[in-house]
Image (spheres, rainbow, N blue to C red):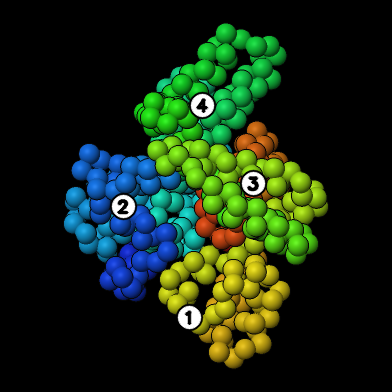
């Protein structure tokens, strides 16, 4: 218990220190997507008192907006105080990561906890008005109970893991496909252990699916009742045509890009039934998928590989608003061209401050990546079953994210990354301080 309190306290202190260096004025500190979360929460989104257009609310899941409304109810519209509530939640995330590590290897408990406490990515994201920290909280609890169930095979842990996976989907839909994937993995593990399909395994399969869907069942029912559609949000189409496809087009001929946007504009000019926003989303999604299917496999592979590489190696410091306020060229305005973007930074004196931070943060990122690779090998040797689960989650999230670039997109994978790094850190610690 002392170790848990110590990890929580260290995590909280580091995050509070970070908050002390921010400007708590809403108009100065909040940027981009954060405005949406702040404005919608202020307007009581997803409640009976909401003054927002119901159709626009279909773009997002309710979880994070209800969380920020609860925070506003407790402390008012005080940005600093609301962020304090969020960093308390993220400090709990650090504790949960250490508990997950303890389930894999007890000696990693403190190493994982300290790494999580000091994680720049977690610290920075917890100081932003976004859905990531709350999503991560539910997702980590899901992982913890899921591991516990695979080890002990207790019904309560199966129900809790499914419930918290469902709650994570109530915040962000990115984990929705994991319901079926995890239910199938439970079935497969049971078949491997028992060498046959048992009644209990089939029952666990359906229990996991049913409980996972429970937190989002009202949303599914409402969408089907009002729009005759079983989906959760209307983001699918816009995400595909405005984020995924443009990144793939970077590896295609220039005329393909012109043709793509011409056809997209023609589709947008058509009149859609405003009462059913899912129609527009589906039309855009169909166009995006058909376009994607016509690309050369090489272009798709390169786009996804570039996305995975940038998201893994992009320094998390670059997400910080104080660093982003430094003069630097826009990555997207340079057509997502890494080489062109870096040349502008390194060969222009006006970007010197940004360049120095970039170099320092990239070196630290590279160091931790080496620790992650080495630790992953140790994880595989120590616990092959959890390694395979981790590999599945890694492939899944990198595939879902695709060629959308930002270090924040590896945030759901931080528990796995930190666990692998903890294996490496333990080896280094034992070599330096333990007697042979």
Q: Dividing the image into 4 quarters, which one contains the C terminus? A: bottom right
The vertical placement of 360 against 150, above or below, is below
Task: Say left or right for 29 vs 136.
Answer: left
For disc 3, the marked residue is 288
Q: Which of 419 and 137 is in front in this view?
A: 137
Disc 1 on helix, strand or loop? loop
Q: How crowded is mark 3: few (under 14 residues within 10 Å), some or many (20 or more)?
A: many
The residue identified by callout 2 is: 40
Secondary structure state at the residue bearing disc 3: helix
Q: Residue at the spot x=68%, y=55% of the render? A: 260
Is label 3 in contact with label 2 (beta carbons under 8 Å)?
A: no
Q: Earlier in the sequence, mark 3 or mark 1?
A: 3
Front position among marks 4 and 1: 1
Tell me the residue at 54%/52% (across/down): 269
> Mark 4 or mark 2: which is in front?
2
In depth, the one of 342 and 205 nearer the eye is: 342
Disc 1: which residue: 326
Q: Residue pushed farthest top?
A: 199
Q: Horizontal and vertical percent for residue 192?
A: 69, 20
Q: Earlier in the sequence, mark 2 or mark 1?
A: 2
Q: Foreground mark, 3 or 1?
A: 3
Name which quarter of the figure residue 426 lies in: bottom right
Residue at numbered disc 4 = 149
């Amino acid at each position: 218990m002392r170790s848990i309190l110590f990890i929580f306290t260290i995590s909280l202190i580091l995050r509070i220190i970070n908050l002390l260096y921010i400007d708590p004025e809403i108009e100065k500190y909040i940027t981009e997507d954060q405005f949406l979360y702040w404005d919608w929460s202020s307007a009581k989104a997803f409640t009976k008192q909401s003054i927002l257009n119901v159709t626009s609310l279909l773009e997002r899941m309710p979880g994070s907006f209800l969380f920020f409304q609860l925070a506003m109810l407790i402390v008012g519209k005080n940005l600093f105080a609301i962020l304090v509530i969020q960093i308390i939640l993220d400090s709990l995330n650090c504790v949960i990561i250490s508990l997950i590590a303890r389930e894999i290897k007890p000696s990693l408990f403190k190493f994982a906890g300290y790494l999580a406490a000091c994680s720049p990515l977690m610290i920075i994201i917890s100081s932003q008005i976004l859905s990531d920290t709350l999503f991560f909280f539910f997702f980590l609890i899901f992982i913890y109970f899921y591991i516990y169930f695979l080890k002990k095979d207790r019904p309560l842990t199966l129900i809790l893991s499914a419930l918290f996976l469902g709650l994570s989907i109530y915040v962000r839909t990115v984990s929705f496909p994991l319901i079926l994937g995890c239910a199938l993995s439970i079935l497969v593990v049971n078949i491997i252990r028992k060498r046959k399909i048992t009644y209990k395994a089939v029952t666990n399969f359906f229990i996991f699916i049913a409980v996972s869907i429970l937190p989002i069942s009202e949303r599914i029912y409402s969408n089907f009742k009002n729009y005759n559609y079983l989906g959760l949000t209307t983001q699918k189409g816009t995400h595909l045509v405005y984020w995924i496809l443009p990144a793939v087009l970077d590896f295609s001929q220039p005329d393909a890009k012109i043709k793509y946007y011409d056809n997209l504009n023609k589709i947008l000019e058509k009149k859609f039934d405003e009462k059913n926003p899912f129609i527009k989303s589906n039309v855009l999604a169909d166009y995006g998928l058909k376009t994607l299917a016509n690309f050369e496999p090489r272009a798709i592979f390169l786009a996804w590989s570039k996305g995975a590489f940038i998201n893994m190696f992009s320094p998390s410091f670059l997400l910080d608003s104080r660093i982003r306020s430094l003069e630097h060229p826009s990555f997207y305005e340079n057509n997502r061209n890494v080489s062109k973007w870096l040349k502008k930074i390194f060969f222009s004196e006006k970007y010197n401050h940004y360049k120095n931070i970039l170099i320092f943060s990239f070196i630290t990122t590279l160091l931790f990546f080496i620790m992650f690779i080495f630790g992953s090998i140790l994880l595989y040797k120590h616990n092959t079953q959890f390694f395979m689960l981790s590999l599945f989650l890694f492939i899944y999230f990198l595939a879902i994210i695709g060629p959308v670039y930002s270090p924040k997109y590896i945030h759901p994978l931080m528990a796995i990354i930190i666990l692998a790094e903890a294996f490496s850190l333990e080896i280094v610690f034992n070599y330096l301080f333990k007697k042979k």
